[in-house]
Amino acid sequence: MTRVTFAFCLVLLLITIATVICQQEDVNNPTEFETDNTDDAVLNSNGTDVLTTQAVFFGDHTQTQKNNVQLRVRKGDYEKYQFQPIVIGGNASDSETMWSKSIRFMNAQNNTYYERQLRNPVLTLWILISRNPKEKFEYSYSLKRFIETAWKLNIQATVVSTYDIDLLAADTGLQKIVYKHQPVEKMPDAILPRMGAKIDYHSLAVVRQFDKMDVLVLNNHNSLEISRDKLHSIQQLATYNLPIPKTMMAKFPVDTENIAREFDFPVVLKKVSGSQGKGVMLVNDRDHLKSLQEMIDVTQPMIFQQYISNSRGRDIRVIVVGGKVIGAMMRQAGDNGFKSNFHQGGFVESVQISRAVEWLAIEAVRLIDLDVAGVDILIDTNSYRICEINASPGFQGFEMATGVDVPQHIMDFIKLRSGVWGKKVKTESKKKNGGAAVYIPVSAEHVLPKPLKTKQISVEPNGSQQVVH
């Protein structure tokens, strides 16, 4: 073998090895991708398949059916990530317009689909949850929707458990946040807590640390501390005379005579922290109340609340984002129960609310200082009454009933807050230099359209018409 032949074979061998290594790296790192800014923007534009598959279609009043739809997906991804597409709204019989006039998402069953990383995101968002690390984790409907919607806007959304975060504060300031034993070198642009009623002391401390480190947090720690406590929320609303059900803190053993003096039976007994209708019961009379004391955990703080009989088994859920009502639905209990929650088997439908009810929801959210909230409103005979405010509202039933894309509204608001209402520079030195200027992008929405070219027509006495230029 000549030296030239040997050199050529060696080069060929090196090229082959390099190709194999690159292919192997691509297999080992399939999570990094770019959006293509289309309606299917979560996927690469190169090497795609157009597949016809069945999607679960939710139409009016959450009626479901299956219908064929076409998906453009990267080759091999359909089987790999086990897509089970869901479509909400639109026209089930028209596959061409279904995607453009509806809420839709891939609903992957393989968790790794939602752990992919954008190459060049415009924003990074941490969605905070609190979960026991010993429990198996599955992405909920809300988390999947948040992530897929964020990708379409080129926002990197990552689900982060507060149990994986450690905090450090010293006399030199809030120095560190450690995530999975590694110091966080670059803070996320925004934090979206999704702990709801499960938020505990540790999770609240994590949110507080981000808040004080000048990271955009929706919702802030003060508002979460109020909203997680139903009695605290009621106290805040009552301070400003907003209509609420009469409420009393429960003390054990219960003074039955005192309860009977302040309330008419039946009366509602609920935990101060809870969601989805859990930890809520209806006490029918004094004997029922006495028997319940032997069954309930008296170490858990609870409240008694006036039972609004006119609103039995129904209420209105209003979602507010950035001080604006994005939609409302009526929730109706199933099986003649008194709990209207969707997750308790209730029914939901879209509803139009008056300006007064819209103001009531917005004002309640403003008093708690929440950016994103669900407001539950009871229907009394003489007034609407605010029952609860949820800082981390679920929205699966809401989207099915209203067709309103909740994550889209929240992501748009995050982009607005991070881009326009940037937090003020704290240090005096930067203040002297004027700080960072705030720029508001100019849109074409306010630009008047060019006047249409019209023809003037004159009518002669004999009835004939003539165009006058």
Image (cartoon, helix red, strand yellow):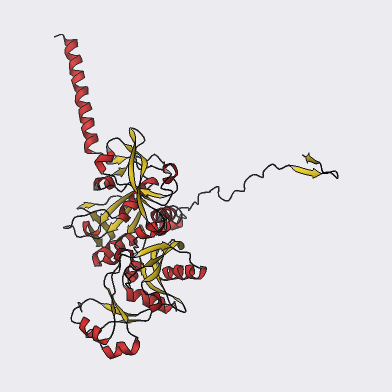
Query: In the figure, is residue 356 to the left or right of 78?
Result: right
Residue 419 in the image: state x and y as whole percent.
44, 52
In the rendered view, would you say 177 is above or below 35?
below
Residue 23 in the image: state x and y as whole percent.
23, 31
Query: Residue reaching furthest top?
Result: 2
In the rendered view, would you say 31 is above or below 300?
above
Is residue 189 visible from the viewing direction of this image? no
Q: Residue at x 18, y 57 (%)?
A: 133
Query: In the figure, is residue 422 to the left or right of 213?
Result: right
Q: Quadrant of residue 377?
A: bottom left
Residue 11 in the image: state x and y as whole percent.
20, 19
- Name the foreground residue: 428 vs 270: 270
In the rendered view, would you say 409 is above or below 112?
below
Circle count: 0
Query: Residue reaching furthest right?
Result: 461
- Name the foreground residue: 394 vs 133: 394
Q: Residue at x 37, y 56 (%)?
A: 63
Q: Quadrant of residue 240?
A: bottom left
Q: Residue at x 20, y 23 (%)?
A: 16
Is residue 302 visible from the viewing direction of this image? yes
Q: Residue at x 62, y 46 (%)?
A: 449
Q: Work out which quarter of the rendered image holds the C terminus and state it.
A: top right
Residue 292 in the image: state x and y as whole percent.
22, 81
Q: Work out which quarter of the rendered image holds the N terminus and state it.
A: top left
Q: Quadrant of residue 392?
A: bottom left
- Name the foreground residue: 467 vs 123: 467
